Amino acid sequence: MSTSPLENLSQEVTRLLATIESFDSLAALVDAEASIIGKRSALSSLQKSLGSLDPDARRDAGARLQEARRLVDDAFAKRREVLSANARSAQLEQDRIDLGDVVVASIRWPASTGHASLVASTQRELEDVFVSMGFTVSDGPEVESDWYNFEALNIPPAHPARGMWDTFYVELGEPETVVLRTHTSPTQIHLMENAVSSSTLPIHSVMPGRCFRRDTPDARHLATFHQIEGLVVDRGITFADLAGVIETFTRAYFGPDISSRLRPAYFPFTEPSAEFEITCTICRGEGCRTCSQTGWIELGGCGVLDPAVLSAVGIDGEVWSGFAFGFGIDRCAQMRHQIADMRALTENDVRFLEQFS
Ligand code: DAH
């Protein structure tokens, strides 16, 4: 009688189980997969040899071989699980950051705690300059009715000057009656109304805040931006007072070698109106690309209060007169720090922000 092909099956299984246990790296185990449980394995060759047995013996041998395979397959799967868990924890260990080490090695002490954004600190410095000139600081709403943003400023519905401000309308109340303020000028109206109702004229105040326009951002414009508005209502105020305040402010904030000039312009709420320009801080007036070779940069608008505005809020224009101005806080930051592209102010790139701590 020929010897059964499965004569050494149990030794073979023992040997395979030992081999499986001996692997201590997942990669080596996976490399050996074909020779342990795959087509090239000893058990697969035994399987092929069963063809020579008679049917009863083959069935019997087949069942034993299947059991042997199950044992080896299970052992292989378990070992693979153990080794991959080990590999995972080794990787975790390698990636672990010892926060204690990081603090000691790379954080200067005292640790950085963040700081106000450039726009916020610019606003504060502008307020300081105006406070030192005798102005108070006031606040106004960012969402305004059409009356405050336009009508009381002598811009009635359908007035062509509305085209100067690309407006975001808020869907509350009647269509187009509620807007995101397009400038800080409506705060002037609130201030004058309050001063009339509480009999606290005169007014010398600046009003910083956020404004919104349906503009496409570019190197010199943002859709959400900041302005600071100025308002003086007093007795005997003239255009010369306005020019003096603008020039004093310009030198105080930008430095003694930067000056201002006023150029005739049109705003519905002031008469006469002017554009307020300062010496280009990039070329110091020589002429460059930023100032289109003019040596001057426009900062905002200003003028003597239009009598129509005074009467809209119930101020007697025979007794009181005044001036107003409004200009960009972001533009001031850009000019003061020579920031080529204003969009840097909103991108939150730490490498940019850190320069203004
Ligand atoms: N509100 C104007 C704007 O954003 C700027 C301005 C012009 C403000 C003249 C004023 C002013 O107070 O008198 O375009």
Image (cartoon, rainbow, N blue to C red):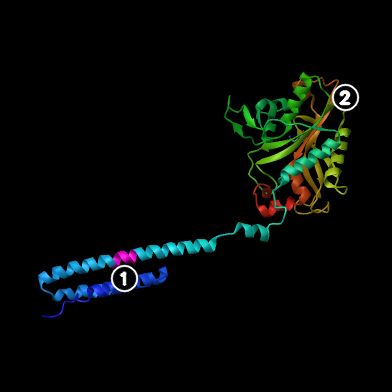
Above or below, comparing residue 174 to residue 50 in the picture? above
**Magenta region, mostly helix, strand or loop?**
helix
Q: Residues within 10 Å of mark 1 (few under 14, many from 20)?
A: some
Q: Residue furthest bottom?
A: 2
Amino acid under disc 1: Leu
Above or below, comparing residue 276 to residue 189 in the picture? below
Between 88 and 333, the residue placed more toward the observer is: 88
Q: Secondary structure at mark 1?
A: helix
Q: Disc number at residue 247?
A: none
Disc with the residue nearer the chain's start (2 vs 1): 1
Ligand 1 image position (quadrant) = top right
Between 44 and 297, the residue placed more toward the observer is: 44
Question: In the image, is residue 76 part of the stretch drawn in magenta?
Answer: yes
Q: Nearer the viewer, mark 2 or mark 1?
A: 1
Q: Residue at x 42, y 70 (%)?
A: 25
Q: Disc number at residue 235?
A: 2
Q: Position of residue 290 (x, y in %)?
A: 75, 51
Kindly check if marks 2 and 1 are in contact, taking CB atoms under 8 A apart as contact. Answer: no
Q: Disc number at residue 17?
A: 1
Question: In the image, is residue 200 part of the stretch drawn in magenta?
Answer: no
Q: Position of residue 153 (x, y in %)?
A: 73, 27
Q: Position of residue 119 (x, y in %)?
A: 72, 44
Res. 213 image quadrant: top right
Q: Position of residue 140 (x, y in %)?
A: 71, 30
Above or below, comparing residue 198 to residue 215 in the picture? above
Residue span colored magenta:
72-77
Q: Residue at x 67, y 59 (%)?
A: 104
